[in-house]
Amino acid sequence: MQLDVSGDGAKLYTTLPRLRLNVNKDKASVATTGAVSCSKGGDSVPIIVSVVNAPIDAIEVSIIKTTYNASVTDAVDPSADITPSATVLKFNTGKRRGVLGFSCAATVKGTTLDYKLGGTNEDNFKLSSS
């Protein structure tokens, strides 16, 4: 076998066409659900959460109780008797979908929970409820 080491053999294998990119400042969406049912004394229907543009590094999504000012006279806890699961979904290039949920007491006074977005790429994503 005779080898040619006189030239730049890498040029033969790296002359690929250019890839055109569209880079913008728009935030990518994390698709969530805006309304979910829960059985009294049971669990919610599964909440599917997904990202179209997978982050290179982690994006985290979870469900938390809605914050309110408990020191206000006649304050009402908007998440009373609702318990979010401890699940924190972590999206990256290998994971684009996940499931969240919560449980309800036999008697429920609250009506809302919030999504929490976090992770190292948080500034590049936004929550989008359907």
Image (cartoon, rainbow, N blue to C red):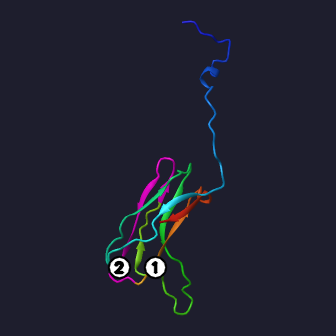
Decide: is 30 above or below 40.
above
| Left or right: 11, with 84 as reference point | right
Figure quadrant of residue 4: top right
Q: Tag 1, which secondary structure?
A: loop
Give the residue drawn at x 52%, y 67%.
116
Is 64 a magenta residue? no
Residue under label 1, please give it.
79
| Left or right: 41, with 98 as reference point | left
Residue type for callout 2: Ala
Residue 34: x percent and y percent? 46, 69
| Left or right: 84, with 73 as reference point | left
Range covered by the magenta-colored residues: 89-108
Give the residue drawn at x 59%, y 55%.
121
Dots 2, 1 in contact, CB < 8 A: no
Residue type for callout 1: Ser
Figure quadrant of residue 127: bottom right
Residue 97 - label: none
